[in-house]
Amino acid sequence: MGHLSTHVLDTAHGRPAAGMAVHLQRLGPGGAETVKSLRLNADGRTDGGPLLDAASMAVGPWRLLFEVAPYFRACGVELPEPPFIDTVTLDFGIADAAGHYHVPLLVSPWSYSTYRGS
């Protein structure tokens, strides 16, 4: 049974990115359709289970949008206008709807990295 999850760590402060807004979109011929919008919990993860559960998993292109600049501003970080990183847009593909896809994000106001986790 497949699922999609995420976890965001604030590397500038060495803690989970609690409260960061995240949007999941399905990409198709008609453009991007927002499937879910949420705020990360105190552990930098989603409440209520994965972003996509087994019944919702679908092969195809997807996008995660992480609202980085608003998160850091809410943490009291003074950012330039415009910020160096505003929204991290991560396009990825689900090739196996029965697979487990974990998309972690390590982020600061000046850099980010991601990978397919387990």
Image (cartoon, rainbow, N blue to C red):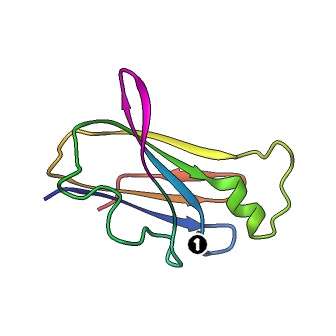
Q: Residue at x 30, y 55 (%)?
A: 52
**Residue 41: percent from the left, percent from the top?**
51, 74
Magenta region: which residues?
25-36
| Image side of residue 50 versus residue 64, left or right | left
Tally the numbered discs.
1
Q: Nearer the viewer, residue 68 or 58?
A: 58
* Quarter of the figure that contains the C terminus: bottom left
Q: Nearer the viewer, residue 38 or 81?
A: 38
- Residue 59 belongs to the span the image colors magenta: no
**Residue 100: percent from the left, percent from the top?**
23, 57
- At label 1, which amino acid type do we have? Ala
**Residue 48: percent from the left, percent from the top?**
35, 71
* Quarter of the figure that contains the N terminus: bottom left
Give the answer, above or below, for where 63 lies relative to 79: above
Q: Residue at x 65, y 54 (%)?
A: 68
- Residue 31 belongs to the span the image colors magenta: yes
Read off the residue under disc 1.
18
